[in-house]
Image (spheres, grey):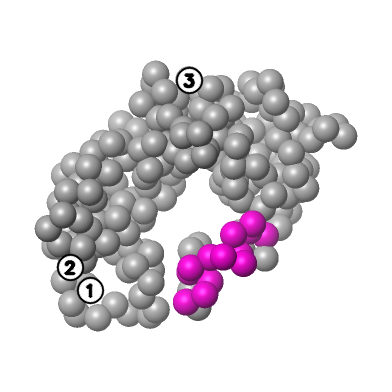
Amino acid sequence: MIHPESIPKHEAARYMGVKGEPSASVAELLDRLEPVVRAVIRPCYVFRETTVEHDEQGVHLGCMSVPLTGKSVAEHLKDCGKAVILAATLSSEADKLIRRLAVTDMAESLAADSLCSAAIETVCDLAEEEIFSRINAPYRTWRFSPGYGDLPLELQADLLDALNAQRRIGLTVTENSLLVPTKSVTAIIGISESPVAGSGVGCQNCCMRESCAFRRSGIKCVK
């Protein structure tokens, strides 16, 4: 288990839709809820190293029986001979806290939800540090998740199966390919022997760019 020493509250404020510096009231709310969130979450992750091959059907990971389809993931992994697949979660306790606060105070529930969103990204950063302290990876890509670009969200279930994530960390997927617990992430990280030149994270590469609430409000969901 890994546990962040702190949750980046500026990131949580961004998830709340705040542009620039948060107001004193928002800052106070996040300061008050951060220790509450940190006390209940139970972060954990699983990963698996695998081979990468390309053909006309898509990108084939050695640990999965179905190919990764779409131009965006093919571009992302084009120079990679290996990859790491990762699943991380804050546990069901995060969802319970958000629901419980929603009954008594919606502002506190929103703050907790946003803090959890920032926390799971921090957990993924920490997981990457641990993983690649043990795995030889001269160069690696950023995290690429199902639903990003034109990689189908429906691949969530196959990634979880390849990781045996339900048994190992209690992470499942709904019929609509949404992760449960909700404050969870799956991702693919490419490994290369030479510098990678991916297209990078950005609105122009995201399949949600036309309906994204962050984009409509003039902010971004990535750093």
Residue bounds of the magenta highlight: 205-217
For residue 36, say whether it is visible.
yes
Identify whether 65 is placed above or below 204: above
Amino acid type, mark 3: Asn
> Are the residues at dot 2 and dot 1 in contact (C-beta closer than 8 Å)?
yes
SS for callout 3: loop
Check residue 26 in the rendering and tell me which mark sits there, or answer none: 1
Overall secondary structure of the magenta stretch?
loop
Q: Amino acid at mark 1?
A: Val
Identify which residue, 63 or 81, lies in the foreground. Answer: 63
Is residue 130 found left or right of 81 in the rendered image? left
Above/below status of 209 relative to 51: below
Mark sitting earlier along the chain (3/1) = 1
Residue drawn at (21%, 72%) of the image: 27
Quadrant in the rendering for residue 189: top right
Query: How far from the left and from the top, in percent, is residue 165?
Result: 44, 25
Quarter of the view holding residue 34: bottom left
> Where, quadrant-wise, is the N terminus in this rendering?
top left
Comparing 134 with 37, the one in front is 37
* Residue 202 included in the magenta stretch of the image: no
Mark 3 vs 1: CB contact within 8 A: no
**Residue 198 at x, y = what percent?**
71, 53
* Residue sitting at x 22%, y 42%: 96
- The span from disc 3 to disc 1 (Cα, nearest Å) is 39 Å
Which residue is denoted by mark 2 in the rendering? 29
> Which residue does the numbered mark 3 point to in the structure image?
164
Circle 1 packing at 10 Å, graded few (<14), some (14-19), many (20+), is some
User: Does the stretch in magenta take in 213?
Assistant: yes
Q: CA distance from mark 2 to mark 3?
A: 37 Å
